[in-house]
Each structure stands twice: as structure tokens, then as C-alpha cells.
Image: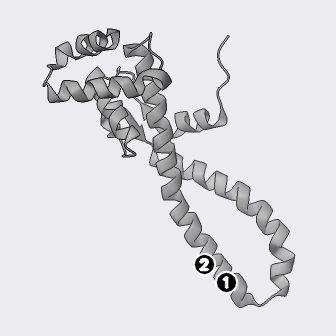
Amino acid sequence: MPKERTFKERILDYIYIVSKQPILLRDLLLANRQYKEGMHVDPAKLGFRLKLTRAYIVYTGLILSILVPLSLLTHKPLAKIDSHISIIGAVVITAIIFIGFNFFRAKMRDDITIELIKKSWKLHFPFFSYEEYSEKIEEIFERSLKEEVPKRELEKYILDNLAE
């Protein structure tokens, strides 16, 4: 029986193109390290791309679902007060909407990043849960970078160090 997808997962599927190619182990580990440090991960490393027009459509829908009921509730009181206050309010709300899109886009990017990292984690480390082992594997990966372990020996190096 297929798992029910959440509203957020449907939005992510709608606004992002995700490559069917598996993520390379080194790219996964680098992306995980960047994500944990609070940095934006290179979308090409994880194989995703934003469909900007669809992101605007989703964001517009979310904003309208908030603004229409809010304007219906506040229309009469605002119609009775000075029009200058309404104009200032409209300018502030417009600024919030335009600034908010950048926050929306960053949040969606972070969500797709962690989703792809966890999905790829299950592929590379099927017996080690992400929540439990991501810190330990990150430390091992740091050591492998210092020791200049070749790419083709990286997986063996990590698994050997996990077994210790």
C-alpha cells in the first residue's frame, strides 16, 4: 500500500525537478556536511532544480489563501478609517509578500535538500539510520578528507571505521 504524501511533499514534487540518477557517496557526504553547517547545498550535487514559475504559482496560492479571508474580515473597519492608513498598510503588506517569497524559496530548498539526503542515505547506508549515524559518519568523512582517502576507497574506509 503506497504511503500517503503530505501537502509539503506534493508542493516539493510540483516545484522541483529531481534527477533519477543516484547521488554519489562523496557528494552525499559533502551535501550533508554543508546542510548541517546551515549552508545552501549545490543543487547540481543532489540533482534537483527549481521550476520558478511553479514556485510563484504555489506561493501566490498560499498568499491568497491568507490574504483573501483576512481582507474580508478587515474590509469594513479599514473602509471607515483614514485612507492613508490603508495605503501604508497596503505598502507594508506588499513588501512582506515580496520579501516572503525569498523565505519561501529558501525553506523549500532546505526541505528538498534534507529529503534527498535522507533518501540517498538509505541507498548508501541502508543499515545505519540518518538520525543516529549522520554525526559519526560526518566525523569519519572529515578524517578521510584529512587522510586524503581516494574516492573509490571512501565507502570501505567509512564502513571500516564504523565497525570499530
Figure quadrant of the N terminus? top right
Residue 20 in the image: above or below residue 157: below
Q: Position of residue 10 (x, y in %)?
A: 60, 34
Q: Label 2 sits on what residue type?
A: Val
Residue 54 in the image: above or below residue 22: below
Residue 15 in the image: above or below residue 72: above
Q: Position of residue 6 (x, y in %)?
A: 65, 31
Q: Secondary structure at mark 2?
A: helix
User: Between 48 and 141, which is closer to the camera in this rendering?
Assistant: 141
Q: Secondary structure at mark 1?
A: helix
In the rendered structure, the answer to whether residue 162 lies left or right of residue 144 reads: right
Label 2 with label 1: CB-CB less than 8 Å: yes
In the rendered structure, the answer to whether residue 11 lies left or right of residue 140 reads: right
Figure quadrant of the C terminus? top left
The image quadrant that residue 82 belongs to is bottom right
The image quadrant that residue 159 belongs to is top left
In the rendered structure, the answer to whether residue 65 lies left or right of residue 140 reads: right
* Neighbourhood count class around disc 2 (C-alpha, 10 Å): few under 14, some 14–19, many 20 upward: few
Residue at 13%, 25% (x, y): give it.
Answer: 148
User: What residue is pinned by disc 2?
Assistant: 91
User: What residue is pinned by disc 1?
Assistant: 87
